Image: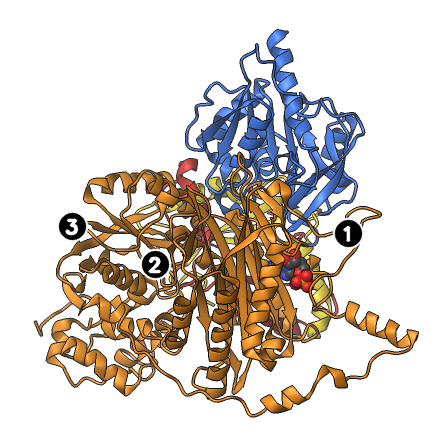
Chain colours: A red, B orange, C blue, D yellow
């Protein structure tokens, strides 16, 4: 199985209310020194065994472009990763 | 002064403008014509600085100056029935009308059409946020919202992008800020395919004596910016200044960005402002809308009749290295400008802190008669505020009745074939029932909270929304928001009256007495004489209709340039009518009553 | 339902977090029930002598990150958690329910609705347990209608937690027409002691036929008032 | 400036309606062969200059544990990354 991870983040100039809210909460946790928090999406796409490696990234890019990221406000990056660990395990 | 030097890129100061009178300026790209540019030079007695040019281009834009519509909109004031219940009328952020001895309400509808096409979710969300701040700025607690929506063909693939986005934007913002959505419209027509209409209404209530002023009055009073940080949001046309003046190939910085709404901050802003009003801590207030600080500073200063001095570097920024003109043009949401007596400044700042909001003193009210904006000690703006806010160009645009009017008028409904057999009737009924315009709007309305605040007496699927204002007396208001673009396309004069009559009836049938009108006029390009004719007809129709019915237009909004290429949308005046009901217990809801009741049709 | 005029009126604390929306509505419901609404501010730990606490609906801290996640770190929640562990009746409605789960006062989590949208409908419910401080005034098995309106209301918990909730009769309210995909149609649950209850539907918006679909929400306050009174006399 | 990235994913047995919805939409894009889509959060924490490197990860872990992930439904991973690129740039 091939896994591609797509990270989608708001463009740098776009307001991120989520990140601001989290940043505002950190002092309550006793955490100081965090200057900036940005919150985006991490999307894991697991391709079936047979799909060839070259096409996997290309397909993932197509999905990211068309569906996962909103080009008006977001940027994305794509990376192939090892996927022996089950999705979402730490 | 020619040696003005500020760290970072060259900043165009007043001194520099005086020293370089012939520097080329991209005023055409900013939407100003030669005549307007020369008028600015006359006013200033020199070329404008980059920041001034940006401010004039914003304040003299169609959106802010109403330069094409003003000559027609005058009719509302002229034909309005005289009443002393209108505490604030056209020209204020929102009209205010007194409904009992001690209570006033304010309501207004505004468009966010173009942003909602580019980014439907955030465009619609910030449309809701903007109109709520208008209501708040008058001194009222916002108590409900409504939304009038028009999309292209229901089956068009782009409608599948725009409609869910717009609805989720309105739902997200309205629900999260805690205002019930009590009604609206959802209409489909191919003419809105490339130009959907998103008109948002908000209504608020206040004790009569809490009415706020938007004047920067009282020499020495402090100018305070309250709310969110300022970023590069919505810096549209003004971004040409960056690329024209500076490094032209570094256009990544010049890209305008979409405004993202933060309803959470808006909710804090509402509660904080209401606290400040009740404690008598502000002498003037203005919301920051589409034109950001540019508009808020110049309008408050102009209304105050004096001058203002501002140190722009004090504005808390979200993005690094913003130029003065960018700070002035930023459309960052969830901000308000306050005018505060210095004796109250500490109290204002501490109340803001309690609500977790930033509040920053930017400058002060002066008697100079000029709006002076410094940036790190260097003057970048020095002009009469009135020239920005009130002395914009006014145009009497050419008007021409469209040629196809006769054709449209000849194509009468009577010529359509009528169903005559049971099968044909069945087919007609099915066709009507399956029309998206008549179908259930549940999918939309169930994404809206209609009961938060606990005072919603009527909402979906009723003809009007109704809100209880006073739990002891039962006093309430009913509002309906209606438009009919197809009818207005046939006859804009009557089309506007039809929308008015529909909204009026919808309010009246609930048992409320109609009292006031707001409107949002959605049209194509004012530079097209046919569109200008439609506009003039619609305004006249609405003004005449209101005079006939005896209720005043208290405010509204004009949205021009709703077109795709040369193809304009149907002229679409959307009309909101507000009525008052003495006791909401006596409301009359939709429905057929009880078995045995007589059914009658009235009217003709 | 209202308290006997001879007794001092019950004080019910209503917390306002930044972004709380239904705090004033909860206060109205409390006052209509004859008790005294006492406003509690998120940043202050004092509970001001209240005998029960209501965590209202809304979008505390914008509900950014996860609904209810940030509110749990407020000063007032430290006090509320202590009081709850000491047996004080605490109810969390909608966002309040989310805060209770995030704080660990109730098990499970509330996640995005299966259909991913905010949905607002009057929700028909069945009262599954009257053995709590907040539901004793209802008839066991009663069918009631209370508005449910949320985007993140889908209750989820692992299999053993669910089994425990069912075995211990801690599911308090169940949807008759599941609006969000909650496991076991769960609309509300309680802690083992029955003093802490979380529910997604909004009883404060069902106290008056004029403004809500029913008056079924009144039972929540009737329950807690009789709970407090019986505790006082016991 | 030190940046720590916290990836928060739903636990494998928790239903992920967003992931399912994206997966369901892929055939419309002409993308086949994706077996599974999971959508989580990517959170970037930027610490101020002075904060020492050792404490940065520790602080980030504290934030992730207490606030960023809900252990009932989510797992997280932590990684320090280079942060010369502006946040969210692709
Ligand atoms: N976008 C919307 N927002 C809120 N309410 C809406 C919206 N669209 C339609 N409604 C509500 O749906 C109901 C039916 O609307 P509509 O089909 O326009 O009715 P009518 O044909 O009777 O004017 C009304 O209560 C109206 O307020």
Name the subunit of mark 2: B
- Give whichever of C53, D84 is nearer the camera: C53
Q: In the visual, does B565 lie left or right of D46?
A: right
- Give whichever of B366, D67 is nearer the camera: B366
- Image height of B557 relative to B270, above or below: below
Q: Which residue is mark 3?
A: B220
- Give whichever of C113, B137 is nearer the camera: B137
- Image height of B529 relative to B469, above or below: below
* x and y percentages locating residue B500 in the rendered image: 56, 66
Which quadrant: the N terminus of chain B? bottom left
Q: Which residue is mark 1?
A: B592
Helix, strand or loop for disc 3: loop
Name the subunit of mark 3: B
Q: Which residue is mark 2?
A: B230
Query: Which residue: 46% across, 49% down?
Result: B204
Q: In the visual, does D71 lie left or right of B260?
A: right
* x and y percentages locating residue B21 in the rendered image: 14, 83
Give the number of the mark in front: 1 or 3: 1
Q: Name the N-terminal-most of marks 1 and 2.
A: 2
Q: Name the N-terminal-most of marks 1 and 3.
A: 3
Which quadrant: the C terminus of chain B? bottom right
Asked where in the image residue A66 lies, by quadrant, the reply is: bottom right
* x and y percentages locating residue B254 in the rendered image: 36, 73
């Amino acid at each position: 199985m091939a896994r591609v991870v797509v990270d989608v983040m708001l463009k740098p100039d776009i307001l991120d209310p989520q990140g601001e809210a989290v940043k505002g909460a950190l002092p309550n946790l006793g955490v100081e020194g965090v200057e900036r928090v940005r919150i985006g999406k991490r999307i894991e796409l697991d391709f079936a065994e047979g799909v060839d490696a070259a096409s996997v990234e290309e397909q993932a890019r197509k999905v990211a472009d068309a569906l996962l990221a909103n080009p008006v406000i977001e940027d994305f990056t794509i990376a192939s990763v090892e996927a022996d660990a089950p999705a979402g395990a730490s | 002064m020619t040696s003005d030097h500020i760290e970072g890129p060259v900043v165009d100061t007043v001194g520099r403008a005086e020293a370089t009178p012939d520097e080329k300026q991209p005023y055409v790209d900013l939407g100003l014509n030669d005549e307007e540019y020369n008028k600015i030079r006359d006013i200033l007695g020199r070329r404008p600085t980059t920041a001034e040019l940006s401010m004039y281009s914003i304040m003299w834009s169609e959106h802010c100056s109403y330069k094409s519509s003003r000559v027609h909109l005058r009719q509302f004031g002229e034909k309005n029935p005289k009443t002393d219940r209108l505490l604030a009328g056209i020209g204020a952020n929102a009209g205010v009308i007194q409904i009992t001895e001690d209570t006033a309400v304010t309501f207004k509808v505004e468009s966010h059409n173009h942003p909602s096409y580019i980014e439907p979710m955030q465009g619609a969300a910030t449309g809701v946020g903007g109109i709520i701040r208008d209501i708040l700025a008058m001194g009222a607690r916002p108590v409900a919202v409504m939304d009038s929506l028009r999309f292209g063909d229901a089956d068009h693939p782009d409608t599948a992008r725009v409609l869910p986005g717009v609805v989720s934007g309105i739902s997200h913002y309205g629900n999260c800020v805690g205002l019930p959505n009590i009604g609206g419209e959802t209409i489909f027509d191919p003419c809105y395919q490339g130009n959907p209409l998103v008109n948002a209404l908000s209504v608020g209530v206040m004790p009569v004596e809490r009415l706020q002023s938007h004047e920067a009055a009282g020499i020495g009073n402090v100018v305070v910016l309250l709310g969110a940080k300022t970023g590069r949001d919505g810096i549209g046309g003004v971004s040409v200044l960056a690329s024209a003046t500076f490094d032209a190939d570094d256009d990544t910085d010049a890209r305008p960005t979409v405004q993202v709404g933060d309803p959470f901050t808006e909710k804090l802003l509402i509660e904080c402002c209401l606290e400040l009003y009740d404690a008598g801590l502000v002498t003037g207030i203005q919301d920051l809308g589409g034109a950001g600080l540019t508009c808020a500073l110049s309008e408050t200063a102009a209304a105050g009749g004096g001058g203002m001095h501002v140190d722009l570097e004090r504005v808390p920024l979200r993005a690094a290295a913003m130029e003065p003109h960018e700070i002035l043009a930023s459309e960052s949401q969830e901000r308000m400008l306050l005018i505060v007596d210095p004796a109250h400044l500490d109290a204002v700042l501490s109340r803001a802190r309690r609500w977790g909001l930033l509040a920053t003193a930017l400058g002060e009210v002066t008697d100079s008669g000029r709006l002076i904006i410094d940036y790190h000690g260097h003057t970048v703006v020095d002009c009469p505020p009135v020239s920005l806010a009130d002395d914009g160009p006014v145009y009497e645009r050419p008007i021409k009745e469209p040629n196809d009017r006769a054709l449209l008028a000849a194509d009468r409904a009577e010529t359509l074939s009528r169903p005559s057999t049971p099968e044909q009737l069945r087919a007609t009924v099915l066709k009507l029932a399956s029309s998206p315009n008549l179908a259930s709007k549940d999918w939309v309305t169930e994404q809206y909270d209609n009961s938060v605040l606990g005072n919603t007496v009527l909402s979906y699927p009723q003809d009007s929304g109704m809100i209880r204002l006073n739990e002891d007396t039962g006093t309430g208001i009913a509002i309906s928001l209606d438009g009919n673009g197809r009818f207005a396309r046939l006859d804009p004069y009557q089309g506007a009256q039809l929308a008015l009559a529909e909204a009026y009836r919808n309010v009246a049938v609930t048992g409320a007495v109609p009292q006031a009108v707001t409107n949002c006029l959605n049209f194509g390009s004012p530079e097209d004489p046919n569109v200008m004719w439609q506009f003039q007809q619609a305004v006249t129709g609405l003004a005449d209709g209101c005079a006939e019915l005896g209720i005043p237009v208290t405010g509204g909004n004009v949205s021009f340039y709703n077109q795709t290429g040369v193809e304009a949308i149907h002229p679409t005046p959307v009309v909101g009518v507000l009525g008052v009901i003495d006791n909401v217990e006596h409301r009359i809801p939709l429905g057929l009553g009880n078995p045995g009741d007589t059914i009658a049709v009235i009217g003709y | 339902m209202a308290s006997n005029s001879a007794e001092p009126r019950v004080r019910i604390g209503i917390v306002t977090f930044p972004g709380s929306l239904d705090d004033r509505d909860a206060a109205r419901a409390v006052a209509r029930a004859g008790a005294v609404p006492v406003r509690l501010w998120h940043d202050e730990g004092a509970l001001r002598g209240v005998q029960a606490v209501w965590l209202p609906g809304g979008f505390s801290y914008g509900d950014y990150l996860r609904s209810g996640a940030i509110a749990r770190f407020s000063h007032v929640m430290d006090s509320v958690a202590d009081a709850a562990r000491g047996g004080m009746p605490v109810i969390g409605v909608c966002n309040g329910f989310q805060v209770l789960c995030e704080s660990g006062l109730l098990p499970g989590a509330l996640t995005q609705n299966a259909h991913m949208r905010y949905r607002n409908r009057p929700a028909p419910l069945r009262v599954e347990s009257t053995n709590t401080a907040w539901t004793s005034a209802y008839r066991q098995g009663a069918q009631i209608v209370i508005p449910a309106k949320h985007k993140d209301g889908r209750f989820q918990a692992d299999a053993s937690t669910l089994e425990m909730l069912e075995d211990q009769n801690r599911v308090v309210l169940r949807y008759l027409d599941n609006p969000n995909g909650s496991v076991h149609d769960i609309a509300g649950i309680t802690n083992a002691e029955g003093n802490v209850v979380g529910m997604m539907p909004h009883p404060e918006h069902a106290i008056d036929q004029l403004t809500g679909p029913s008056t079924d929400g009144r039972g929540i306050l009737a329950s807690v008032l009789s709970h407090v009174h019986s505790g006082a006399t016991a």
